[in-house]
């Protein structure tokens, strides 16, 4: 089974022996023991399945051709970095990152960071999509390939919860507690620190293939390779700016106007309306952050992506007319859509047309007619149960059908059984 590392090697072909002016190989590491204080490391003693299972979860699709055929761009999909003599540097040239050049950087002692690997690996996309639904927060990932005896990044802390999964080789990690009270659960990431600024680690551990290390945001960390082994790991991140504090800090410029409008209403409405507006804005941000749902083969076959094309007199016909009053439908995922207010309008914000690259697309939404609002609410709250089109709470059968057709065309719902061409 070829991992990402092996695939890059095969697609790169023979590599040059001439070295770039990259960082010198450094940071020889000794055998370290584990300490634990606020962070968690899952080692062999936990009887975790190792190596093979972890590698298979990041194997690219058979149609993914890695850097050789995908349009991988420096600074967008891939970074070349180094950390030597206390100095962190980025070595990205402009343009496309081809295997020949990337492996030359690696041979010179540079670390390779692959951004948004979910855009190139369906397996990674699937894992992140599941975690996103379970966490209720955007989940991202980066993969890191580091040569033996080198370090790619300076000590720092992040504004995310980090889960480090070692895929190949070994990596030595040191983790440090927050230095000050205002660095506990920070809202933004730190600059790079010098070794003198961070004190002594609370954890000093070597991860091997199959190991998992978790540390919360605000915990300073640095990782370097042992002299006898390369390292390939993936960092899964979540909960960026997704706290109650972030919600309370959310400012809606329309709040004053909205409050003036509801002053004549009940005190209860006047009290809760600003929070509702802030929650809607936070929800729209979250849906924009999300990966699109990754459908199973069965779900895809019963959605717009698997619907048969129909033709008459050389023209394509709308497959949505096959949806009947007794057709059973449901949302593709529980968190795939949300109703939000926008002034006097109600919008359905959704994730099915998002890109697998973070924020590559603009936020997706469309206006919902008043007669469809209750029906959309029913679909959202019915998940994972299927309901019939006839059960949608609309006054007219035509309104029920038009809503089902619209949601089907947007990829927001799928049917209990695949539709067939008439």
Image (cartoon, rainbow, N blue to C red):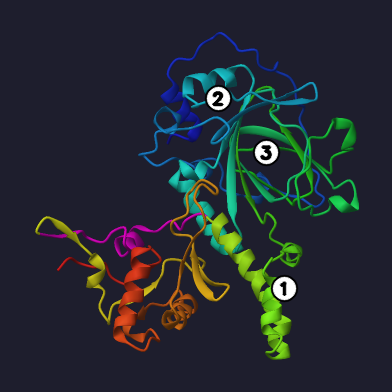
296 horizontally vs 235: left or right: left
- Label 2: state its secondary structure: loop
Mainly helix, strand or loop, the magenta region? Answer: loop
Q: Is residue 414 visible?
A: no
If you read the primary sequence from the N terminus, does the residue marked by circle 2 or circle 1 appear first? Answer: 2
- Label 3: state its secondary structure: strand
Is 307 or 152 nearer to us in this picture?
A: 307
Residue visible at 72% across and 64% down in the picture: 251
**Could you say where residue 392 lies in the image, as x and y percent from the top left?**
38, 84
150 horizontally vs 288: left or right: right
If you read the primary sequence from the N terminus, does the residue marked by circle 3 or circle 1 appear first? Answer: 3
Q: How many marks?
A: 3
The quarter of the displayed image where residue 44 is located: top right
In the picture shown, does residue 366 fall above or below 105? below
* Quadrant (top left, top right, bottom left, bottom right) of the N terminus: top left
What number is the disc on residue 207? 3
What number is the disc on residue 94? 2
* 84 part of magenta stretch: no
Q: Nearer the viewer, mark 2 or mark 1?
A: 1
Residue visible at 79% across and 38% down in the picture: 191
Residue visible at 26% across and 74% down in the picture: 323
* Quadrant (top left, top right, bottom left, bottom right) of the C terminus: bottom left
Give the distance between the C-alpha atoms of the residues marked 2 and 1, in whole angstroms. Answer: 46 Å
**Could you say where residue 209 lies in the image, as x and y percent from the top left?**
59, 38
Q: Mark 1 = which residue?
A: 256
Kindly indicate whether the residue at mark 2 contacts the one at mark 3 (C-beta within 8 angstroms): no
Q: Which residues are magenta?
A: 291-312
Residue visible at 36% across and 86% down in the picture: 391
Number of residues whose C-alpha sits closer than 10 Å to that of mark 2, classed few (under 14), some (14–19) or many (20 or more) = few
* 307 part of magenta stretch: yes
């Amino acid at each position: 089974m070829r991992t990402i590392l092996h695939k890059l090697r095969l697609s790169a072909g023979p590599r040059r022996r001439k070295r770039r002016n990259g960082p010198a190989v450094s940071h020889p590491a000794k055998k370290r023991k584990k300490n634990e204080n606020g962070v968690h490391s899952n080692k062999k003693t936990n009887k975790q399945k190792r190596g093979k299972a972890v590698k298979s979860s990041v194997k690219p699709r058979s149609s993914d051709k890695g850097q050789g055929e995908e349009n991988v761009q420096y600074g967008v999909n891939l970074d070349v970095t180094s950390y030597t003599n206390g100095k962190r540097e980025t070595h990205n040239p402009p343009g496309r990152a081809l295997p020949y050049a990337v492996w030359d950087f690696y041979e010179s002692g540079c670390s390779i960071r692959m951004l948004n690997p979910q855009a190139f690996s369906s397996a990674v996309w699937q894992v992140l999509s599941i975690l996103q639904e379970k966490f209720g927060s955007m989940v991202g990932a980066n993969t890191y390939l580091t040569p033996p005896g080198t370090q790619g990044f300076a000590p720092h802390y992040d504004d995310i919860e980090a889960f480090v999964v070692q895929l190949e080789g070994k990596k030595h990690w040191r983790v440090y507690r927050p230095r000050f009270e205002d660095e506990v659960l920070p809202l933004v990431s730190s600059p790079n620190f010098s070794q003198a600024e961070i004190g002594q680690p609370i954890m000093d551990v070597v991860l091997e293939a199959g190991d998992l290390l978790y540390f919360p945001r605000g915990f300073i960390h640095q990782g370097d390779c042992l002299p006898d082994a390369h390292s390939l790991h993936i960092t899964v991140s979540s909960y960026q700016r997704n706290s109650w504090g972030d919600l309370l800090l959310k400012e809606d410029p329309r709040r004053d106007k909205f409050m003036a409008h509801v002053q004549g209403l009940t005190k209860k409405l006047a009290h809760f309306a600003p929070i509702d507006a802030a929650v809607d804005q936070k929800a729209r941000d979250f849906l924009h952050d999300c990966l699109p749902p990754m459908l199973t083969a069965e779900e895809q076959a019963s959605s717009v992506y698997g619907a048969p094309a129909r033709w008459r007199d050389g023209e394509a016909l709308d497959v949505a007319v096959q949806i009947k009053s007794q057709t059973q439908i449901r949302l593709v995922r529980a968190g795939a859509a949300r109703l939000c207010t926008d002034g006097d309008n109600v919008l359905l914000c959704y994730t099915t047309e998002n890109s697998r690259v973070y924020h590559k697309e603009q936020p997706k939404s469309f206006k919902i007619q008043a007669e469809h609002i209750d029906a959309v609410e029913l679909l959202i709250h019915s998940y994972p149960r299927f309901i019939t089109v006839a059960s949608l709470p609309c006054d007219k059968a035509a309104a029920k059908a038009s809503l089902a057709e619209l949601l089907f065309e947007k990829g927001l719902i799928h049917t209990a059984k695949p539709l067939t061409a008439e």
